[in-house]
């Protein structure tokens, strides 16, 4: 091993404390990435076998969604054991081998930590069920007595994030809180043993060479439930200002301050990124250097493909990360949302608060009609803009192939608890978790040798890695070219890589900005062709004719 990561051009020393500030992080949903042993589930050796692909793509790190033992009541976010690998996905030795292979390719590894809840199969929850009320075992979770003469009624009418009730009875008059699925009991973070065990888990994976962590539901851990529980309506009416009983409490940061001491006991310090769905102006707390250090910003993911919205979001978030001393994160797709190539082909949201694409998914992909070509053009344009921004970019597996959301999954094959708990009013997130097509043909288009755990549409063959390799105009080639240029041009070192300066475009639908080294990005959000400013054209998301940028396209120039 040498002491630098990546090819000579983009060398990042292994001990670089700031590597994450402008990293390109590729999210792997392990059970849907590559299946090495033909059981229909992707696995750790499958990831290892694809390291050359990741290296050629040019990403700095991978983030692995949970690969821990799990009954998959929520796609692995119901963890049975935080310090083990699901035997269907491999062993700890396989994990170590993956880390070595990634490291040799210059790629760091971030793993998902799910601290808000365990699974109901976790040894602690089993112990809690077998122990009486008031026991130490029950204190690790959030148990309450039921209401009614026989305590047969839930302690409150709260609704779970996936629909349905969020309190479940255990048969002796007590009920437990599960903010997500019934199989995901919420932990009690006031319990010292819970706290210590997670510190142990963070050390366990850090010792195995993990570079950082993605923290699931980071805004939910600290809870302060009054003796008399409020109703759901009362809860909803409370301000989320740091004092709410459940969400985004100020004291959650005491937990992360403890975690920080663990992170900083390593060289380089381990990093963390918070999944915190909080008000934009409270996000910086999660990104503070005394806490997790970085937080996801989902603002672009929730926006329309619209110049004005993009500019406001970019300005706001760059200012926020200056405040926290962190760096911005940019995300368009992940395992929880409709893929952006599809979202951008749907009618604009115009500020409507909708789960993007939910209406379309519910209609089985029939209505409203998706403009597939426009969706992909816009997705490519948005990505090229994203890669030029200061800060780090989080990609989701398959977006580099331009994969669309899959709407047509038979009910019998669906897996997401959101689908089962909502009786047909929420189709869930399976459509972005369909296994990756690696080859044009074959039983699972090269994902493995058996039928995959979620069905792939026949159109996936044409969208495979193999097909993309052979097409110079493919989205895969665009991502590779873009990441290689970014690696060369990214202004490293300073916080935010030196920021950006907006340029006057004379067209409200066109955004242009310049990085300090003269790297210019122009994005045309409209449909009127736009004449590019002076500079050498480095790359464009759609073909140019005579320096004219067509609609729904981005170009990079060098001054
Ligand atoms: C996060 C995850 C999501 C999961 C939920 C409960 O939002 O991203 O996939 O269902 O937490 O763990």
Image (tube, rainbow, N blue to C red):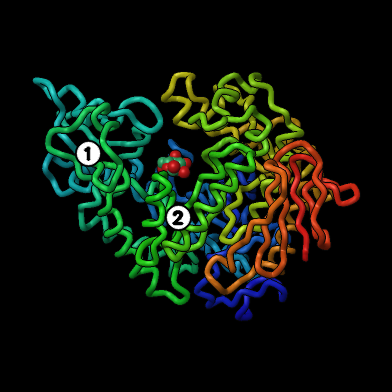
Q: Quadrant of residue 341?
A: top right
Given residues 130 and 315, the one toward you in this image is 315
Given residues 237 and 75, the one toward you in this image is 237
Given residues 23 and 77, the one toward you in this image is 23
The reply to whether residue 50 is visible in this rendering is no
Q: Residues within 10 Å of mark 2 (few under 14, many from 20)?
A: many
Instruction: Please state, as top left, top right, bottom left or bottom right, where the N terminus lies in the image.
Output: bottom right
- Name the residue beneath numbered marker 1: 129
| Left or right of residue 27: residue 320 | left
Instruction: Write the residue at 41% across / 52% down.
Output: 283
| Left or right of residue 364: residue 526 | right
> Which residue is at the far right?
546
Q: Quadrant of residue 74?
A: top left
Is 55 above or below relative to 458? Answer: below
Q: Which mark is residue 25?
A: none
Q: Nearer the viewer, mark 1 or mark 2?
A: 2
Q: Where's residue 384, x and y in %?
A: 70, 52
Q: Which mark is residue 295?
A: 2
Is 302 above or below relative to 212? Answer: above
Q: Where's residue 291, x and y in %?
A: 36, 62
Q: Residues within 10 Å of mark 1 (few under 14, many from 20)?
A: some
Instruction: Write the residue at 72% across / 44% down.
Output: 507
| Left or right of residue 548: residue 82 | left
| Left or right of residue 217: residue 11 | right
Instruction: Write the residue at 30% across / 64% down.
Output: 258
> Which residue is at the far left?
149
Question: Is label 1 in a helix, a strand or a loop?
Answer: helix
Q: Earlier in the sequence, mark 1 or mark 2?
A: 1
Instruction: Please state, as top left, top right, bottom left or bottom right, where the C terminus lies in the image.
Output: bottom right
The reply to whether residue 143 is visible in this rendering is yes
């Amino acid at each position: 091993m040498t002491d630098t990561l990546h090819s000579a051009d983009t060398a990042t020393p292994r001990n670089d404390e700031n590597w994450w500030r402008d990293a390109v992080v590729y999210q792997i949903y392990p059970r849907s990435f590559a299946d090495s042993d033909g059981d229909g589930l992707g696995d750790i050796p499958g990831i290892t076998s694809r390291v050359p692909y990741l290296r050629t793509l040019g990403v700095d790190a991978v983030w692995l969604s949970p690969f821990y033992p799990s009954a998959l009541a929520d796609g692995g976010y119901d963890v049975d054991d935080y310090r083990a690998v699901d035997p269907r996905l491999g062993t700890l030795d396989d994990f170590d081998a993956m880390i070595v292979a990634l490291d040799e390719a210059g790629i760091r590894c971030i793993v998902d930590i799910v601290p808000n809840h365990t699974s109901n199969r976790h040894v602690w929850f089993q112990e809690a069920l077998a122990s009486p009320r008031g026991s130490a075992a029950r204190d690790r979770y959030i148990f309450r007595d039921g209401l009614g003469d026989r305590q047969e009624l839930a302690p409150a009418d709260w609704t779970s994030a996936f629909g349905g009730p969020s309190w479940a009875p255990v048969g002796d008059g007590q009920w437990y809180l599960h903010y997500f699925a019934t199989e995901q009991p919420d932990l009690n973070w006031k319990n010292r043993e819970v706290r210590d065990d997670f510190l142990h888990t963070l050390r366990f994976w850090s010792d195995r060479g993990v570079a950082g962590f993605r923290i699931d539901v980071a805004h939910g851990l600290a809870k302060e439930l009054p003796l008399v529980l409020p109703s759901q309506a009362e809860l909803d009416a409370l301000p989320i200002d740091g004092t709410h009983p459940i969400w985004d409490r100020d004291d959650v940061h005491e937990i992360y301050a403890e975690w920080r001491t663990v992170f900083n006991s390593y060289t380089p310090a381990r990093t963390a990124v918070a999944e915190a769905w909080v008000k934009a102006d409270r996000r910086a707390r999660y990104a503070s250097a005394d806490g997790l250090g970085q937080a996801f910003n989902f603002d672009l993911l929730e926006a329309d493909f619209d110049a004005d919205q993009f500019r406001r979001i970019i300005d706001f978030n760059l200012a926020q990360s200056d405040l926290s001393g962190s760096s911005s994160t940019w995300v368009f797709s992940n395992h929880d949302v409709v893929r952006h190539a599809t979202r951008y082909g749907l009618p604009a949201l115009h500020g409507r608060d909708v789960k993007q694409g939910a209406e379309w998914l519910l209609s089985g992909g029939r209505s409203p009609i998706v403009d597939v070509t426009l969706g992909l053009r816009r997705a490519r344009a948005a990505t090229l803009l994203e890669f030029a921004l200061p800060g780090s970019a989080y990609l989701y597996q398959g977006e580099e192939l331009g994969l669309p959301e899959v709407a047509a999954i038979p009910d019998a094959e669906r897996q997401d608890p959101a689908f089962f708990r909502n009786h047909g009013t929420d189709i869930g997130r399976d459509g972005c978790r369909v296994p990756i097509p690696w080859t044009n043909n074959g039983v699972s288009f090269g994902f493995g040798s058996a039928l995959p755990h979620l069905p792939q549409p026949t159109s996936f063959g044409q969208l495979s890695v193999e097909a993309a390799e052979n097409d110079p105009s493919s989205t895969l080639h665009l991502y590779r070219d873009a990441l290689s240029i970014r690696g060369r041009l990214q202004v490293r070192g300073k916080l935010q890589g030196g920021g950006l300066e907006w340029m006057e475009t004379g067209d409200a639908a066109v955004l242009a900005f310049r990085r300090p080294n003269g790297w210019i990005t122009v994005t045309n959000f409209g449909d009127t062709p736009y004449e590019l400013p002076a500079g050498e054209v480095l790359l464009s998301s759609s073909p140019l004719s005579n320096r004219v940028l067509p609609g729904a396209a981005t170009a990079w120039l060098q001054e």
